[in-house]
Each structure stands twice: as structure tokens, then as C-alpha cells.
Image: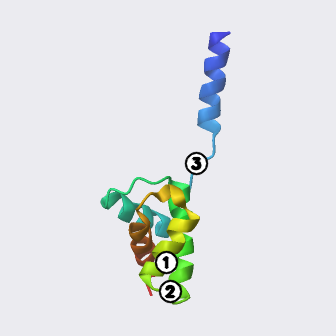
Amino acid sequence: MKTTLVAAVVAGIWLAPTAYADSQDQAFLSFLAAHNVAVDTNTAMNAGHIACAQIVDGESPSVVDAIVSRQFPTIGGDESWITAAARKAYCPN
């Protein structure tokens, strides 16, 4: 029984899909890591894309920070880092 369970767990891990982040996502996450921002990866990337959309729409950094903070309360004070990372990785122009 234990052998079957262990084999099933190992097979499940081995067959699990690998998470994929493109080069923009990697740059975004690397920026956050370099600044010791510990936020769930999916939450951070979603917030980053929201921040970029707001930046592209011409919102000021403080307004973008407020939008990110309101929409992603689990970020816990790191919204300015999210905005800076989004500006650098997702919408540098």
C-alpha cells in the first residue's frame, strides 16, 4: 500500500505541468526578488499587468500604486515595488 502511494505521488510530481514564465515575467520577478519583495508569484504578475495597463493609460505612479494596493490587498505595502517592476519589465517604453 505504501509503495503504491509513494509511486503515485512521485508519478504525479513528475507528470505535473511545469510552470512557465516568459522573459518579461522573469525580469519582473527578478526585479522583485532583488528588492526583497515576497509576494505570491501569480498575484505579483497579475498586479504587474494591472500596473502596466494603468501606466500606459497615463496614470501617475502614486495613482497606480493606489490601484494596485486596492485590487491586491495581500501585497502588503509593496505596491510601489510592483509598479516599478512593471514599468521596467512589462511596459518599459
Q: Classify 56 as above or below 66.
A: below
Percent x, y of residue 11: 64, 30
Where is residue 42, by image quadrant? bottom right
Question: Is label 2 in contact with label 1 (beta carbons under 8 Å)?
Answer: yes
Residue 64: image tag: 1
Distance of label 3 from label 2 (alpha carbons):
35 Å
x 64%, y 38%: residue: 15
Asked which secondary structure carries label 3, the reply is loop
In the image, what residue occupies the spot 50% across and 52% down?
40
The span from disc 2 to disc 1 (Cα, nearest Å) is 6 Å
Quadrant of the frame with the C terminus: bottom left
Identified at 54% across, 73% down, the residue is 67
Residue that badge 3 annotates = 18
Type of the residue with mark 3: Thr
Which is nearer the N-term, disc 2 or disc 1? 2
Q: Which quadrant holds residue 5? A: top right
